Amino acid sequence: MASYAHIHDFHVYLPAWKKESWQELSKSILETFQQIEYSGTKELADGLSKYWITWSALIDFIREGLFKTKVNSILDPWAGSGAMLLELTKTINVKNAKGICVIKESFELANKLDKEKKMTWILGNPLDELEKLKNKYDVIVSCPPFGVRPTTHIFLTKDSQKSLMDDLGNLIILKSLLHLSENGVGFFVIPQGALIVQKNQGVFANLEKFHLHVNAFFALPYPVHSDTSIPSALIVVKHGMSENIFVGELSLNYEKNQRLLANYLEGKEGKDPSQGRIIARDKFRGYQVLVAEDRAERMAQRMGLEPVSFRDVVIEVNLAKAKELPGFEERNDAIYLPLIGSSDVVTSTSELKIKPHNYAQLILNTEKVDVRFLANFMNTPFGRTIRESAYSGMVIPKISKTSLFETKMYLPEKKKSQLLILDADLKINTLITEMQELRTLLWSRPSDVSKTVKRINMVNRQDRFEDWLDNLPFPLASILWAYHIEKDNNQKKLLHLDHFFEALPEFIATIYLSAFKNDSELFIKEKKKIKEILEKNGLSMDRSTIGTWVVITERLAKQTRKMINSQDKAMQLRIKNIFKLSTLDILENLSSSKIVEILQKTNRLRNEGRGHGGIVSDRTAGIRNSELFEYLNQLRQCFGDIWSRWILISTGKMNLQEGIFKVQANSVMGTRTPFKHIEVEVNIPLNSNKLHLIGEEDRAALELLPIIKIAPAPETELNACYFYNRIETDAFRYISYHYEAKPEIKDSDLETAKELKLIFNN
């Protein structure tokens, strides 16, 4: 039977008729399966509700953009139950259309769905049935099976016969392509890694022997088979030879797909990898590598770094001589780069964390680069992006010697600058060590507290708290600023800190809910689970409480960590997609279990104190201030630098230039208002006057649900931040934790109601 896809949110830009068309087809498929008494009807019903969602964009992409010539004949060598072929031919007049079905129930279903009897359906083994076909076809389209055990098949060429061994799906692709007309085109959904790891006896390594070539490769944003999470791609195959391949990414956005098609058909590159790159076939190492290369280039531009040839920096690359330690001859001019995974680059074999054969020893040109500098640099987010750009393969991405020498490096031009950076880093580490020593001294000699405090003040000559606030999103920074400027009143300072730890879980939960709603399958599943936990604890989203937002954050942070730490690269890609981020390190910080622990502890403190207590004395307030400030310091460590790399913006007007939307926005960061005006570039339009989070090098932004609002405060030019508080009879109530002149507002806007009901209702 047909395979069914993961559910994903295609609702944004797809034309409405397509949704109705696929829903109608799904209903028809289900009814037909009931008529033929198919035993798996219940499971089928669960899958059909999402079948049209994934495939409608793919079918639309093929039909609208690639059927530019008259199509008289079409073949699907692995037709499933015929849905793909039926939908493709709905608007074109095809004289000869054939679909090969493998399973009897699918064959019967295809015949019943083909109410106009336009198709010829064949039941049998595709390799055998294709052997019997005599006709040529203008279009061959299919989504053959993934990962079926390799087998050997003999193919006849004009001059000889060729024995190839490959997965069944790839053998079916080539067998069907032998029936492609001279000017015909083939469209196939394959695993993304199929073109990257080409076996000598495999199909894609031997296409040219059959005068065929892969003309284009379009990465799909999500897997297409329900029974596997293997990243997928649509390839276009034609007759002839070509040294280049057009590479892009099929999107969930209809307009973006149209721009991608236009670039492909015109043979030009887009400004963004998703809009198309023309790559030498022998240099192609996967779409994600192109994304990493593009991100590294933009990061380098922001940092003011120029590209450096890998060969200028590295004299020699050695692989391990043994699987056991040490595995290499120790050298002072070498660093050790992990070929798989995310372990640190190190400078000695004694520091290796995984087996030696999973490292490469890089012998450096020490006139150009310092060994310690390059090791540290390659462990930064930027350095890890460079490492990603050297990967090959999809299932287990790996760096090869060949790919290393093709990798661009970005370094300070002068070695002197590298040494200055190392010196500054040493001073920072010295300060950290000294402060740790003072902390130990403080608790080991409490009677000498006065002396210890004097030493602390000598080290901490400048308060960096204000600098930190300037790098926080305004909804949080505005509350902490009120705390910071309150000098002597412990009770007022405590009130501001209490407010901060009330707002914090709501802010973080808003990010999670906004992200997960981008993936309908995950969103529906997690909403159900969250509702169960809330009801069990007597909580509800109808009325905002700290407990409500802590529950949401705890649950969704846990699911985020699972996806980040999954060995399944498709799962990691999926979590990056829903947060609109191109790197995982920001999410690793945000989803830290330590943050959840801080939220739980501060919630308990509030319940034991201001939440359920009487008047707080100045002395008690001072003690609680110290407790909460310690948690604030811990939170600061957990956040790291994410808010300098993932900024909150409020969007305004935008212009489309060469396929890129230039958005006029306000940077909703720090304590100061009015906000700084900035321009950001994205490859899909953003809703105006909405809050978004956007990464520095990303061309996509996460739109936040209207749980948090930034509104001009009345009678001033300043801005105020408001957090959702509860549902009232005719509106949603929001409160501000920092703007005393108007501490609450009500919103009865229909769009707000629609978006909030999306998360409140199941």
Image (tube, rainbow, N blue to C red):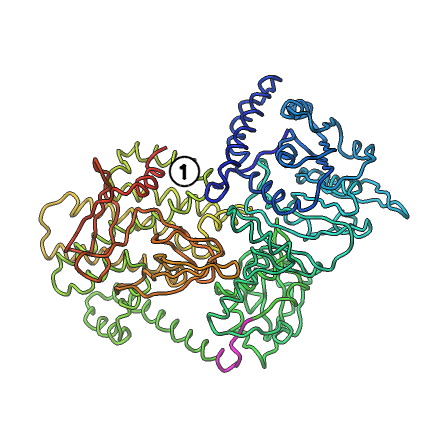
The residue nearer to you, when weighing 761 against 441, is 761
Residue at the (55%, 34%) spot, across then down? 51
Q: Residues within 10 Å of mark 1 (few under 14, many from 20)?
A: some
Number of on-image labels: 1
Q: Quadrant of residue 137?
A: top right
The residue nearer to you, when weighing 344 against 543, is 543
Q: Quadrant of the N terminus?
A: top right
Q: Report whether 118 appears left or right of 543.
A: right
Report which residue position mark 1 lands on. 526
- Tell me residue 676's x, y (percent): 32, 66
In the picture shown, does residue 419 fall above or below 92?
A: below
- Tell me residue 542's x, y (percent): 26, 37
Residue placed furthest toward the right: 159
- Tell me residue 326's x, y (percent): 62, 63
In the picture shown, does residue 589 fall above or below 303?
A: above
The residue nearer to you, when weighing 359 against 714, is 714
Region of the chain picked out in magenta, as a range: 410-418
Answer whether residue 368 is magenta in the image: no
In the picture shown, does residue 602 fall above or below 729?
A: below
Q: Quadrant of the C terminus?
A: top left
Residue at the (68%, 56%) spot, across then down? 245
Q: Amino acid at mark 1?
A: Glu
